[in-house]
Amino acid sequence: MTPLDLLRGAVEEAASDLANGNGSPAARPVLERPKQAGHGDYSTNAAMLLARVLKEKPRAIAERLASGLEGRLGGLVDRVEVAGPGFLNLFLADQWYVAASAHVLEAGDAWGGGTAGAQAPRVNVEFVSANPTGPLTAAGGRHAAHGDALARILEFRGHPVSREYYVNDAGSQVLRLGASIRARARGEAVPEDGYQGDYVRELAERIPGASDGDDAALADAGVAMLLQGIKASMHAFRVDFDTWFSERELHRGAIEHAYERLAEQGHTYESDGALWLKTTDFGDDKDRVLRRSSGAHTYFAADIAYHLDKRERGWDVLIDLWGADHHGYVPRMKAAFAALGEDPDRLELLIMQFVNVVERGERASMSKRRGDFVTLDDLVADIGVDAARWFMLQRSHETTIDLDLDLAREQSNENPVYYVQYAHARIASLLRKAPDVQPRAEASHALHPSERDLVKKLLAFPEEVEDAAERRAPHRIVAYALELAQTFTAFYRDCRVLGAEEPGAEAFRLALCVATQRTIARALGLLGVSAPASM
């Protein structure tokens, strides 16, 4: 248990003693850091929750609860004050902070992780999955950064995780690529619905006999070359997929298998020569076609078969990252998953909003079809992997990002990723200068408020990881890493570390530095960002 868990447990036990068999509050008491200075280190609403059970005024209950907490915590608490309508503000003693720092230090690199439990669900995260009809764009980089960071966070919590890329190598868009390559090879105009980029010309030059090839063969050759490039781009971006799943595999029996499963569940019917799925039974606005009267399968049918395949491979939770233009597709996919007899809550469809690359206040265009787009490779070559991943992850996936190239290039504290990395490098430098001092989580001096603040920020890390995992929100780790670096900078400003005058303070502060360095490195690692030892 973390020090916060122990503190929370003391609050709940004291509340339970007061309830004395009269029932339990409808909600669990909250233990949080007060927003205003002077309101204690942590506050709880336990007395207000007990008021409904005991039918007494909250402040009267709070007075008794404060006495019970002081008795339970002993020397770990300086005092407990009643505030407002019945909040309790806990002012913790230095002894608690020293014990808490020792707990963090002892946990080592595992601090904040492994909280999902022995029976943690197995999670499949499918992301990027851009059509292999062109190089990856900067927009694909946002999907890559988010999906990979989410997988890292889930793994750190203890979930078995698989990263998967769905290769859309079947269908009309692939054939249009083949037609575009042939046109380029012949020096002809690319079809209106084809692909215009210079990369198509390069493919035409690389494929032998492209001017005489048929669209399907040229498409196959082009897709193979583009996929090779996509894999290289992803690896350079620190993303390596466990599975590259070909859509073509679904047309070798998996789609028919899905039809059988849906029929067994009683949710398909035929009309006008087509096979339909009764998605309206599961909240969709209309039923959907699976197999057209021509015998061709719809994209929807392939998607159903694909998700059934993932479940049959043993994945408990399926997380898909989709583009903003797929928002309307969510209800029908959820309906189809339920029609398979699966729990729709096990299918999570995250809609990723757009990313705009901005330079000197101007936005770059992002159309792969027109050929005027910023590739992920070019973006990384310009600002580096660290800055690219950080800025892609700094906002919720539900929010559009303006990636400011000018800021991302800055080698100063104005650039947040530089600021966090510099804090890590500064600590590494400090530790190199004190090779003979053994960091120890022991203190006899009166702790400075900045020392206390740093311990509290370190203690917040496990909950931040849990929150980021549960909400599928890596941006929470970005915010935490920046806040931790800022808290450390204030500590470093206010508290002399090397050669500290107070007896024992140097070893204790070095211990805080070690814990902070590890936590910054872990937070950056969860984001796929490096933690340099020097800058």
Image (tube, rainbow, N blue to C red):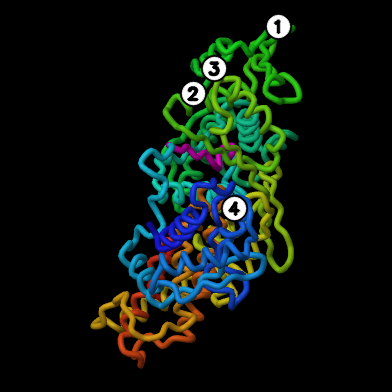
**Of the residues shown, which amino acid type is indicated by label 2?**
Glu
Q: Mark 3 points at which residue?
A: 258
SS majority, magenta: loop
Q: Is residue 405 magenta?
A: no
Numbered disc 2: secondary structure: helix
**Viewer-nearest of discs 2 and 3:** 3
Numbered disc 3: secondary structure: helix
Quarter of the rendering occupied by the N terminus: bottom left
**Of the residues shown, which amino acid type is indicated by label 4?**
Leu
Classify mark 4: residues with Cα within 10 Å, few (<14), some (14-19) or many (20+): some
Numbered disc 1: secondary structure: loop
3 or 4: tag closer to the N-terminus: 4
**Viewer-nearest of discs 3 and 1:** 3
Q: Name the residue under label 1.
A: 273
**Of the residues shown, which amino acid type is indicated by label 1?**
Gly
1 or 2: tag closer to the N-terminus: 2
Residue 35 pos. (x, y %): 62, 70
The one of 467 and 264 positioned closer to us in this rendering: 467
Residue at the (44%, 62%) spot, across then down: 7
Are the residues flagged by discs 1 and 2 in contact, CB closer than 8 Å?
no
Q: Mark 2 points at which residue?
A: 249
Q: Give the range drawn in magenta.
A: 122-132
Residue 221 pos. (x, y %): 51, 32
Structural distance between the alpha carbons of marks 3 and 4: 56 Å
**Viewer-nearest of discs 1 and 2:** 1
Structural distance between the alpha carbons of marks 3 and 1: 19 Å
2 or 4: tag closer to the N-terminus: 4
In this rendering, would 448 be left or right of 135?
left
